[in-house]
Amino acid sequence: MKLSLVELSTVAPGSDKAQALKDSIDAAKQAEDLGYHRIWYAEHHDSASTASTAPELLIALAAHTTSRIRVGSGAVLLNHYSPYKVAETFLQLEALAPGRIDLGLGRATAGPVVDLALRRDRDVSPRDDFADQVQEVRAYFDGDFPASHPFARLNPAAGVASRPEVWILGSSGTSAAMAGRLGLGYAFAGFINPDGARRALLRHGAFSTPAVNGRGILSVSVVVADTDIEAKRLNWSRTALMARLARTGPAATVPTIEQAERELSEAEKEAPTVITDGRWPRQIAGSPATVRDQIEQMAQATRVGEVMVQDIIADPQARAHSRALLAQALGATPEHTAAQAA
């Protein structure tokens, strides 16, 4: 099973965004050394708890400091942007790191004020044309606009020998069939909608072309520690952050474990972090053996060969330790080490 990481640039308690961004770049090197297959950077706006507003910048820096791991976006929120600009940007990244760039595409709202601020033409009502936008990006990559199309003369891919991998990210399953029909990979956010993971990923597989079979990713929220008890405790920060966001919105900051312990009810602290009565949790937390068992069950149920983890852990050192334990548990192996062993 391939193991990958989506990096949120979490701002640690008492720290700032400059340090969070530095940690995010360091995470790429750590992930590569541990044998992770890819690292994607998120796009979040108007957020005090995360620092990654422009994944393209982090991708460029991470690609420059690594040599093997795939680097991409999780996701570029295409509904806010020009497909031409997105295509140009990722073709340039591909030229800088050939064969290692992923363009993860999604659509999301950051709230009406942010959505309006991101738009150039604010006098026209937005429309949902995500599928058309995705196909326009691909047309720039492949140069396959019809001859009569006004953009047919544009050729942003000229001089770029390879193309980024294109992925669709979703949490409701509505884009799963579209990704399969277009021959694109599909990554499902199980940490948002765990109950919809099986249906969405199996639906994508049903529509996938033979060349794209297996290009499904299950994304899950994971905390790993030396013991189940310690992992569950570390997970309180994420639980408390979600509650803060619900109460105060984007100004919410990541709480320390001690703050989370005071803010959460006993029921919240004891919420299931493993599969319970057949229901998948929003967050998986446990020892390496516990988490390996949970992820293997989920991967089998969704028929994916790759799992991508996110981890909102307040302490950066605990976060790095969690990633190392997970890589060991799932047998992730750096390619250069595997080659030497062979």
Image: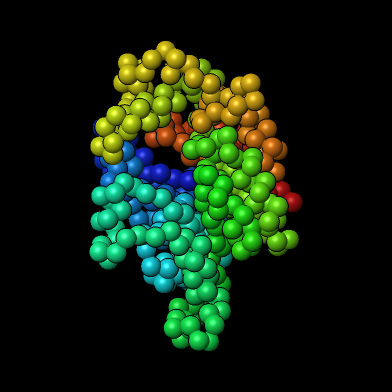
Query: Which percent across, then down, holds residue 53?
Result: 33, 52
Q: In this orientation, which residue lies closer to the viewer: 243 or 38?
A: 243
Query: Which percent across, then down, holds residue 84?
Result: 41, 72
Q: Is residue 204 above or below residue 236?
A: below
Quarter assignment of residue 19: top left
Which residue shows up at 35% across the image and 60% down it?
A: 126
Which residue shows up at 64% across the image and 52% down it?
A: 204
Residue 89 visible from this viewpoint? no
Query: Which percent across, then down, holds residue 45?
Result: 31, 48
Q: Is residue 323 above or below residue 215?
A: above
Which residue shows up at 46% across the image and 54% down it?
A: 106
Quarter assignment of residue 23: top left
Q: In this orientation, which residue lies closer to the viewer: 7 or 75?
A: 75
Furthest-front residue in this view: 125
Q: Is residue 232 above or below residue 53?
A: above
Lateral position of residue 10 relative to residue 227, left or right = left
